Amino acid sequence: MTTRIGFLRAVNVGKRTVQMAQLAEVCTGLGYTGVWTHINSGNVVFDAPGSRESIERAIGAALEELVGFEVTTFVRTVAEVRAALQVQPFPIEDGDTYFITFLLNPPTAEVTAALEAASNEFDTLVVVGRDVHWRMRGSSMETTVKASTWNRIGKLGTTSRNVNMLTKLVAKIDR
């Protein structure tokens, strides 16, 4: 069994509500073990065999059946999240916000170039594998890289998490 972390895209925003107890029940119902959730933003830790893709599809389908809307799910192993946190592709200064944006699939060279070309004085994007490291020189509410920017680049399938939260999540797993 491999310990994995599931990240749900765009839940608990507006009417797209998924209770964390529901998420845990879905994962347990799928036969995953050691299931627990972390904060109320669609993060779940569990042990499961099988491919990343099959787990993403299974959780997404079970949640859609339960809540009545599509729930894109991104799965990483704990080792993959640890590795992403070790990358640190740019210095972080006081006041900066740092996210890792998970992609469903590895981007093409063209998509990688387009994402990194969206960088500017406020936002810096660096693609490493299926992850986009995203530093903002201030609050995420001030970003210049809007949803329209991501959509113009392509239908990527993304969800973002703050590095501070990811660091705390991995520390909790390591206890």
Image (tube, rainbow, N blue to C red):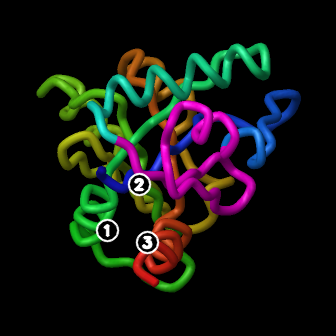
Q: Which residue is mark 2?
A: 100
Q: Secondary structure at mark 1?
A: helix
Residue type pointed to by label 2: Ile
Do tag 3 and tag 1 residues touch (Cβ < 8 Å)? yes
Tell me what residue is drawn at x 44 percent, y 36 percent: 74
Q: In terms of depth relative to the viewer, which is nearer, 8 or 55?
A: 55
Distance Cα–Cα, label 2 vs label 3: 14 Å
Do tag 2 and tag 1 residues touch (Cβ < 8 Å)? yes
Is residue 58 placed above or below 123 in the rendered structure? above
Q: Which numbered disc, 2 or 1, marks the residue that appears first in the sequence?
A: 1
Q: Which residue is mark 1?
A: 85
Residue type pointed to by label 3: Val
Which percent across, then down, holds residue 20? 74, 48
Tell me what residue is drawn at x 80 percent, y 29 percent: 16
Tell me what residue is drawn at x 12 percent, y 27 percent: 109
Q: Which residues are magenta?
A: 24-48
Is residue 146 placed above or below 84 in the rendered structure? above
Distance Cα–Cα, label 2 vs label 1: 8 Å
Q: Quadrant of residue 114?
A: top left
Q: Quadrant of residue 130?
A: top left
Which percent across, then down, holds residue 120? 38, 50
Q: Which numbered disc, 3 or 1, marks the residue that appears first in the sequence?
A: 1
Q: Which residue is mark 3?
A: 170
Q: From this viewpoint, is residue 147 visible?
A: yes
Which percent across, then down, holds residue 175? 46, 84
Q: Is residue 84 rendered to the left or right of residue 32?
A: left
Q: Which numbered disc, 2 or 3, marks the residue that appears first in the sequence?
A: 2
Q: Secondary structure at mark 3?
A: helix
Q: Secondary structure at mark 2?
A: strand
